[in-house]
Amino acid sequence: MNILVYLVVFFFFIVLFVVGVYNSSDVTVNLFVWRVGPVPMGAVMATAAIFGVAFACTIGVIDGIKIRITNRQLRRQLRRLEEEADALRLRLARNEGSAGGPAGTEGAS
């Protein structure tokens, strides 16, 4: 699956490169109150792609942090439940051992 993702990303950047090379005309970029230009269209596309990848990576890192936090909480809960189950098993084993088992009490009656 990872190789498929790598191939798709590689193909995307190849297409971006080809389109950027064929569109070499200069453009002016207007950002709200900031104006940049004239700049080659390929540079604008490359900058947009770089910012897009950086934004996606930031979202991925934040999501990874959330997953690790949830994982840690679930591990604590699992440990607590395993300790509780062990305590219940020990308690059950002690009760069965001191009563001599169900067959021992039936024979005494």
Image: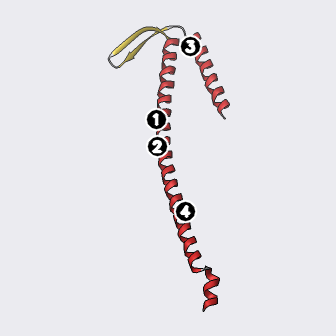
Relative to 62, 107 lies left or right:
right
The numbered disc on residue 62 is 1
Relative to 25, 32 lies left or right:
left
Query: Disc 2 residue type?
Result: Ile
Q: Give the mark nearer the N terminus: 2 vs 3.
A: 3
| Residue at numbered disc 2 | 69
| Residue at numbered disc 4 | 86
Foreground residue, 92 or 57? Answer: 92
Q: Secondary structure at mark 2?
A: helix
Q: Are marks 2 and 1 in contact (CB under 8 Å)?
A: no
Q: Residue at x 60, y 23 (%)?
A: 12
Judged by depth in the image, the label closer to the viewer, 2 or 4, is: 4
Q: Are marks 3 and 1 in contact (CB under 8 Å)?
A: no
Q: Position of residue 77 (x, y in %)?
A: 48, 54
Specify the quadrant that holds the N terminus: top right
Distance between the alpha carbons at the discs numbered 2 and 3: 41 Å
Query: Disc 1 residue type?
Result: Ile
Distance between the alpha carbons at the discs numbered 3 and 4: 64 Å
